[in-house]
Every structure is written in structure tokens, then in C-alpha cells.
Amino acid sequence: MHAAIIDHNTTPTYTSLSILRALKQRSHHAYYLPIDKLSCIITNNGVEVRFQDKALKIIDCFFLRAIGNILNSERFEYRINLLKSLESMKKVIINPVTGYLNARNKFSCLSLLASKNINVPETLITENEFIAYEFIKKMGKCVVKPMMGSRGIGSFLVEDADIAFRRLQELREKGYALYIQRYVNKPGRDLRVFVVGDEVIGGMARESDNWKTNVYQGAKGRLIEISGELERLAVKVNKELGLLYSGIDIAEENGRYYILEVNASPIWVEFQKVTQINPAEKIIDLAEKIIKNNG
């Protein structure tokens, strides 16, 4: 198999390197493609995506890691259409573009899951700071998040609607939509459950004294047992979003699970350390199966 990783970083991260190493250990041909080195050519013969003007026909499977977080609308649309063009060339992309987008945008993610009767925290998305103000007054403790982002970066906790109002005004004036979520009173942790295909390969609790339970923000992982209920929930979330694999963040409150976010290109340094499971191996197993079935 010829396989390539697409990422916005110039050099591979730990997660990308783990995929590259696992591919090479199985004697597959592995490539790393920074997304800004790709281009798309449209002719009467169709559409072709190239890397530094080299054809990509030899590549059987692409592992999509990231397209970049800080992008203007034109660049974002270009990169998404570039990936869709790869799919139109009958290339396998893991994760598929639609699933990746469903998870990347928190608005799309939670609204889709809620429509399938999956528990999510009460969330408001608006451009109006007065509507946001009333929501915070009603809910009390809330978290304001970037609609597209990860690692807890840019998220902040608000408990006083009047103090929050000024910060929300600033965000609105800078052109941001306001994404506000009721704070789930989790017990000093949330759960990261890793799904590949129709299987939960493992999970960990992310524990912290801080309200942010992201590993990037200092949380520590602890191995957990996955109950049948949690396993069914995680597999359903992955499937409903159109993903082949994901890292799902789940909060517990009063005996109920709430989906906080779903990551279509999760980082697994802490997960691998805690569980002794390398997701790259499972993801490549899935890629090999898809390529074989397509063949």
C-alpha cells in the first residue's frame, strides 16, 4: 500500500510520526504531505490533485490529520475543496472530508448528535451578545468556546453574566459568532474514548484540578474500564458523524453522559502512554481492510 499523511505542519508531529513508522514497519510506502504543498489542476480531462507538481495517482490512502486552525474563509474553502477533489479521484481519505468537517465545527457536531437523541450540554450559538447575556443568566456557569478549535485553547469560564457581557461584546466586534455551553458539573475529569471503525479500542479519564480537562492544559490521563453503555454511545457518535475513527470527549454529570466534543484527528500521546495502545496500528488495520475491499 502507498499511503500519505496530509497535515498543515511543515514537519510531522508525534501522532503523524507514529502513523508513518507503523506503515513502514508493515513494509508499506509512507509519505508526508504538508497541505500547502498540494495543488489542484482542472482540465477538460477532469480534476487532479498534485504534490509539488507530482502526480498522486500512486497513493492508495490518505490520512487526514489537520488543515490548519487559523484560516481565512477563502483558504479554508480552498483546502476543503482540494480534499473533496481527492475523494472525487476515488482516493480513500481517513477521515472522510464530510465526517472531518462534522466534527471540526462544534455547531455542526453537537446539532447533528442532538438530532439523534444523544445527550449534549445546552448550548447557544448567536451573533448577539444580549441573547448570550440572557442565556448565561439563565444557565449560570457557562463555557465560551471557539467554534473551531482544540486543546481548550481560547475557551473561558463565565459565572457572572454582566462580567461576561463585555468579553462577548469584544468577540462579536471582532467578527466571531458566540458559542456558549452550559458548564457540565463533571467530577474533576472527563473521559476520552477512542473509536476505530465499530470498535472502542480504549479509554482514559483526563483528571485535573482545573476546570479544563485537556491534556494540553495539564490534565493527566488515567486508565478506565469501558462499560457497555459507554462503548455503545461512543461507537454511535463516531458513526453518526460519518467518521472512521475519533477521540470522543465525554463528561459525566448525575449519572448521565454528555458529549462535549469529537476530534476527527486526535492527538494520542497521553492515550498511548496510559493504555499502552497505539491507535496508529488500529487505524492502519482499518485502512488495509478498506483498500482490500475496494480492490
Image (tube, helix red, strand yellow):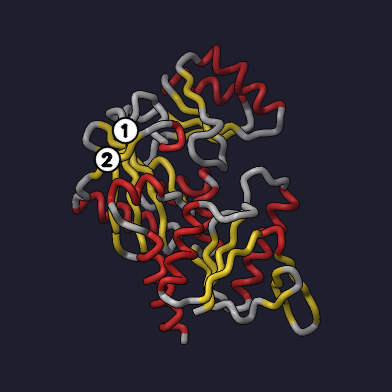
Q: Is residue 172 above or below residue 119?
A: above
Mark 1 neighbour class, 10 Å CA radius: few under 14, some 14 to 19, many 20 or more = many
Q: Is residue 132 above or below residue 119?
A: above
Task: Identify which residue is drawn at 77% across, 73% down.
Answer: 41
Residue at image mark 1? 207
Tag 1 secondary structure:
strand
Cα gap from disc 1 to disc 2, whole angstroms: 7 Å
Q: What residue type is labelled 2?
A: Arg
Which image quadrant is residue 77 in?
Answer: bottom right
Q: Is residue 32 above or below residue 257?
A: below
Residue 2 at x, y percent in the picture: 53, 77
Label pair 1/2, CB-CB below 8 angstroms: yes
Q: In this view, does 189 lie above or below 148?
A: above
Answer left or right for 266 relative to 192.
right
Q: Which amino acid does label 1 sit on?
A: Glu
Tag 2 secondary structure:
strand
Residue 268 at x, y percent in the picture: 41, 50
Mark 2 neighbour class, 10 Å CA radius: few under 14, some 14 to 19, many 20 or more = some
Residue at image mark 2? 222
Answer left or right for 163 relative to 57.
left
For marks 1 and 2, the one nearer the N-term is: 1
Task: Identify which residue is drawn at 57% across, 69% down.
Answer: 31
Task: Identify which residue is drawn at 53% across, 52% down.
Answer: 13
Camera-side residue of 27 and 101: 27
The residue sitting at the right extreme is: 43
Residue 171 at x, y percent in the picture: 65, 27
Which image quadrant is residue 84 in?
Answer: bottom right
Camera-side residue of 56 and 86: 56
